[in-house]
Image: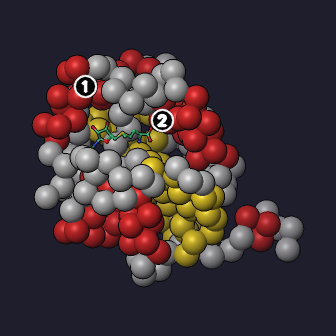
Amino acid sequence: MSTPISHFERMYADNPDPWSFESRWYDARKHALTVDALPNRRYRSAFEPGCSTGMLTARLAARCDRLLAVDAVESAVRTTVERLAAQSHVTVRTARMPHDWPDESFDLVVLSELGYYFDDADLAALLDRAATSLAPGGDLVAVHWRWPVAEHVRVGDDVHAALARVPGLHRLARHEEADFLLEVFTRDPASVAERSGLR
Ligand SMILES: C[S@@+](CC[C@H](N)C(=O)[O-])C[C@H]1O[C@@H](n2cnc3c(N)ncnc32)[C@H](O)[C@@H]1O
C-alpha cells in the first residue's frame, strides 16, 4: 500500500515544516544541486509533484517560464502559495499522485523525495504518467534519500532503478552520495555539451 495521505496530514498538523526544509543545510544544498543539475538554462513548462512547503519550488521558479507545483496536503499547498505569491508564472494546487497527474505536457518533471511513498502499482502509474507527459526533448530530474525509513514503501535506489527501466528515457546524469541519488533522465539523449553546440 502507498503511504496514506493521512500520514502526511498528521505530520503537517504537528509541524508546518515537518522536514525542516526552511532551516536544514542538508536540504538547501540538495535543492541547489538539483537545480544546478538541470541540463537546460530555461524550461517552458515544468511540473513538481509533492512540493511540500515550496522551498525547491522557489528555486525551480527561477528557471521556468511556467511551473505547476502540487501537493496532497492542503496546508503545505497554502504555505507554498504564500511563498510563491509574487511569482505569477507559478501555479500551486492540491493534487494526489499518481491519479491527479495533470493532463498536460511538460518539458521538465521533478520527482524530488516522492517516489518511495508509492506501492508497485502506484509507482508504475506515476512513472508512466511522468514519462508520457514529457514533451519531446523533455527532462526528468529525480532525487531520493537512500536509507530505509519506516513510512517509505521502498528505498530511493529502487525508485531510480524503476526509472532506469522506463522505455524512452535515457540517463543523462547521475550524482551519487551515501545519503541520496540525484539523476537526470531525458527524452533527448544528447549530452549537455551537444545541446550547447560544444560537440
Ligand atoms: C519529503 S516531502 C518532499 C518535498 C519536496 N519535493 C522536496 O524535495 O523538497 C514529500 C511531500 O510529498 C507529499 N506527498 C506524499 N504523497 C503524495 C501523493 N500521493 N500525492 C501528492 N503529494 C504527496 C507530502 O505531502 C510531502 O509534502
- Badge 2 marks a residue whose secondary structure is helix
x and y percentages locating residue 100 in the rendered image:
21, 51
Does mark 2's beta carbon lie closer than 8 Å to ligand 1? yes
Q: Residue at x 42, y 79 (%)?
A: 165
Q: Is residue 123 visible?
A: yes
Q: Which residue is drawn at 63% across and 45% down?
A: 33
Q: Is residue 129 visible?
A: no
- Residue 54 vs 49, above or below: the answer is above
Which labelled disc corresponds to residue 12?
Answer: 1
Does mark 1's beta carbon lie closer than 8 Å to ligand 1? yes
Give the amino acid at mark 2.
Thr
Using a 10 Å C-alpha cutoff, classify the residue at mark 1 as few (fewer than 14 neighbours), some (14 to 19) or many (20 or more).
some
Alpha carbon distance from label 1 to label 2 = 18 Å
Residue 180 horizontal side relative to residue 128, left or right: right
- Badge 1 marks a residue whose secondary structure is helix
- Do the residues under discs 1 and 2 have CB atoms within 8 angstroms? no
x and y percentages locating residue 55 in the rendered image:
48, 30
Please give the residue where the numbered disc 2 appears in the rendered image: 57
Ligand 1 positioned in quadrant: top left
Residue 81 horizontal side relative to residue 2, left or right: right
x and y percentages locating residue 11 in the rendered image:
23, 28
